[in-house]
Amino acid sequence: MKQMQIPKRLTTALVNSLTAGVVPRVGLEHIAVGRKPEVASILQDMDNIAEGGAAFRLISGRYGSGKSFLLQMIRNYAMDRDFVVADADLSPERRLVGTKGQGLATYRELMMHLSTRTRPDGGALETMLQKWIAALQQELMQATGLRPGDPQLHDAVELRIYAVTNEMQSLVHGFDFAKVLAAYWSGYKLGDDDRKAAALRWLRGEVPTKTEARQELGVGVIIDDDNWYDYMKLWAEFAVRIGYRGLLLFIDEGVNLYKITNSVSRQSNYEKLLTMFNDTMQGKAQYLGIYLGGTPQFVEDERRGLFSYDALRTRLMDGRYSSGTRRSYTSPILKLDMLSHEEILLLLQKLREIHALHFGYEMRLADEQLIAFMQAAMNRLGAEELLTTREVVRDFMDVLHLLHQQPLLSFEELMGEREQEYAASGNQGFKNKGGTDELDDFLAEFEL
């Protein structure tokens, strides 16, 4: 088998993240298994978005099924394809709308995590603006022969900047957005750091009052709880005008909307979600993709989930011919099944190799031992429906760490100790409790 070649910084991120049970931000391509139809469908979305379309997807799967992993992997693919991306997790403090600025808090989180290929870890706002201005200057210098610092060059750049911003003035809130961009250019040109900082604070949604916005920038509006999504549509338009392919928003932990106890507030958030859905589906938004992760309960519960809001239920529910075993990957909801046993085995093989590469030792575990680990994990939980990828990965990383740190400890000894502890706790050890016929067939292939 060909040896993996992965930089140490990536193996470090992978090992640390997976040990803690969280999704790595980088290196996901080295541990990705399965999800080919889902990924292919979203890559098709990206092609449509780059052509001026829009997309809205709900990634539905239970805890530990790989929602966050898929969102993060798509985020990385998008940056590689020259999209601007932004991600945020919803929480009690971050919603789509709220009476205490929770919608604005989500906008601020998205802007803090605004990322591009050259700034993959967030904070890309000022970098994008500077790159745009530098590209305009370079282009005009080559076309006109003007030198840096020449007043005529500044005038020419300014004309190009206003040409872009003028195109945006016809959009909702476009006039003020354009005015703030022009203010940033003014600060850039004059070396006025305070003016540049004021423009950036406004664009990040950090200016608290209209009075302050008027004093600092000459605009009479601010980004707030009611209009933040309109500005996200403007960012998508602007990103394309300065050379990117579009803007993708990745919003995870949608279940926090389901948990809102006040029914009026919950319905308000679902109404905002409906607006986003309609905009992307009906062509009211361009160059924008919205990907929301949530549990099946958040989506399908007809008492307080998305399906309790009739306008969303009728738009999101499967068509009559897509139910059951046949699934359309172009529907607004992408339902994530658990990984198959073959895919889990492939994942464990990748983790085994990455762990050995990171710590610099010869791999000790054979494929048969990986399968024995899978069988033990499944039997301990009692049914394959309870087994999540997150649990398997975290436990397997624990096994790898222990075997590496204690060279005299064998895999069989470690598994035997855990079986004894499990049995002593009142359970029946690693006995097959049903629901694993598929695993039995899989094991038979390996004569185990």
Image: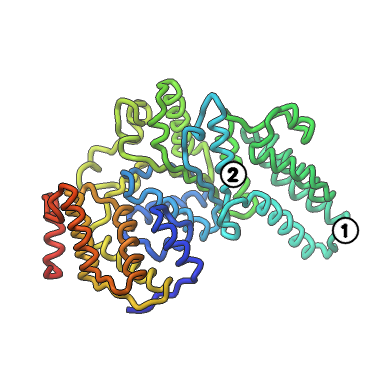
Report helix, strand or loop for mark 1. Answer: loop
Which residue lies at the image location 17% right of the left edge and 51% below the top edge?
Answer: 424
Tell me: 1 left or right of 324: right
Q: Position of residue 448 (x, y in %)?
A: 12, 68
Q: Which residue is mark 1?
A: 150
Q: Most extreme residue toward the right, as rendered?
A: 151
Rendered image: mark on residue 281: none
Of residue 186 and residue 167, the one placed in the foreground of this image is: 186
Check disc 2 and give the amino acid type. Answer: Met
Local crowd at mark 2 within 10 Å, few (<14), some, or many (≥20)? many
Which residue lies at the image location 28% right of the left edge and 51% below the top edge?
Answer: 388
Against 180, residue 359 (above or below) is below
Q: Give the CA separation, mark 2 to mark 1.
A: 34 Å
Residue 383 visible at all: no
Dividing the picture into quadrants, the one containing residue 137 is bottom right
Report helix, strand or loop for mark 2. Answer: helix
Check disc 1 and give the amino acid type. Answer: Asp
Nearer the N terminus, badge 2 or badge 1? 2
Q: Position of residue 63 (x, y in %)?
A: 33, 45
User: Which quadrant: the N terminus?
Assistant: bottom left
Which residue lies at the image location 75% right of the left edge and 62% below the top edge?
Answer: 138
Q: Position of residue 290 (x, y in %)?
A: 47, 43
Of residue 361 and residue 368, the one placed in the foreground of this image is: 361
Of residue 203 and residue 392, the one placed in the foreground of this image is: 392
Q: Which residue is mark 2?
A: 111
Dividing the picture into quadrants, the one containing residue 310 is top left
Against 418, residue 111 (above or below) is above
Against 274, residue 240 (above or below) is below
Of residue 271 and residue 155, the one placed in the foreground of this image is: 271
Dividing the picture into quadrants, the one containing residue 182 is top right
